[in-house]
Amino acid sequence: MEIYWFDASHFKPNKMIVVYQENGWQIISQRAHGLLAGEICSHWKNENHPERWLETIIATAEHDDAYNEFDEDNVLLNENGGPVNFKMRNFEKEKCDKLISHALTKSRYITLLVARHIRFLYENEQDSVVKKYCAALQKKETGWMKEIALKAKDLTAAYSILEWCDALSLLICQGLIQPENRSIEISSGPDNKHYKLHSPERYVLNVNPWPFERDQFSVSYESRTISQLTFQNIGQFRNALMEATVDFHKFNFVKHNLAK
């Protein structure tokens, strides 16, 4: 079986996902992608749940919720007037600050997971401003962990679940599921195992090894398709996005021995 590799650390905050199709642009909002990641997370094996499980799911679902394509985000079009895919965007301090600010209104634990996600995405950047930002964030993490008596190893284990679910959601939303039952690497989970995704039939997904509590379950997400390829300004694009028909996507996860 062929295996394809996917490295989520190469991708910046997950903003709007843009997939070109024959009938136009398929747009998946950041929050729709995040909701799918949270839904996947909710099915994790009970015995491997962090102590603060509900907050882990919330952090996974809301890990990049500062990005709202329907509202204040004004980096939506490229120089040719086409929609900007999330991989084309760079570090934005204001957005990262907003993520942390929102998380702090919920809990220190959620804030720690969001902060760890920001550092996961950016701490290897060469830009001195970005490096300084991540270093300052790491110092704050130390203080927040002391405040809630959270051990570093427990934070790392919880974040690895968030990152894994984020990576799997990205694979699905970008349409990177491989044909003909070929495998693609997802990410390493909290146990440092390498997980592979493959699809034995259309809309059926299998993960090996199986990290979930139930032997089968369904997940879903929404997208919008815009037939117009270029736009004069952000307002025109946003109107088209808001008026576009919503498409519903559903996938069934089935454990390998049941999917045969």
Image: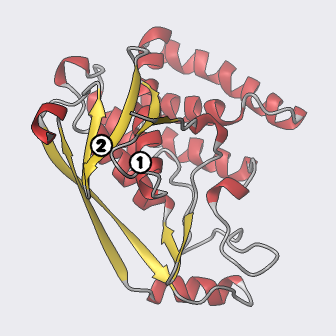
129 vs 115, left or right, is right
Q: Which of the 4 image quarters holds residue 32? A: bottom left
Name the residue type under label 1.
Answer: Ser
Residue 234: quarter of image: bottom right
Q: What amino acid type should be assigned to the residue bearing mark 2?
A: Ile
Query: Camera-side residue: 76 or 229?
Result: 229
Q: Quadrant of residue 15?
A: bottom right
Horizontally, residue 224 falls left or right of residue 140, namely left
Quadrant position of the C terminus in the picture: top left
Residue shown at the point (12%, 35%) measured from the top left = 215
Q: Which residue is mark 2?
A: 40
Residue 222's x, y, as percent? Answer: 35, 68
Q: Residues within 10 Å of mark 2 (few under 14, many from 20)?
A: many
116 displayed left or right of 204: right
Can see residue 151? no
Instruction: Say the numbered circle drawn on residue 169.
Output: 1
Of marks 1 and 2, which one's residue comes earlier in the chain? 2
Q: Position of residue 28 (x, y in %)?
A: 47, 66
Q: Secondary structure at mark 2?
A: helix
Residue 69: x %, y % from top left: 56, 70
What percent of the width, then of the height, locates residue 26?
Answer: 49, 73
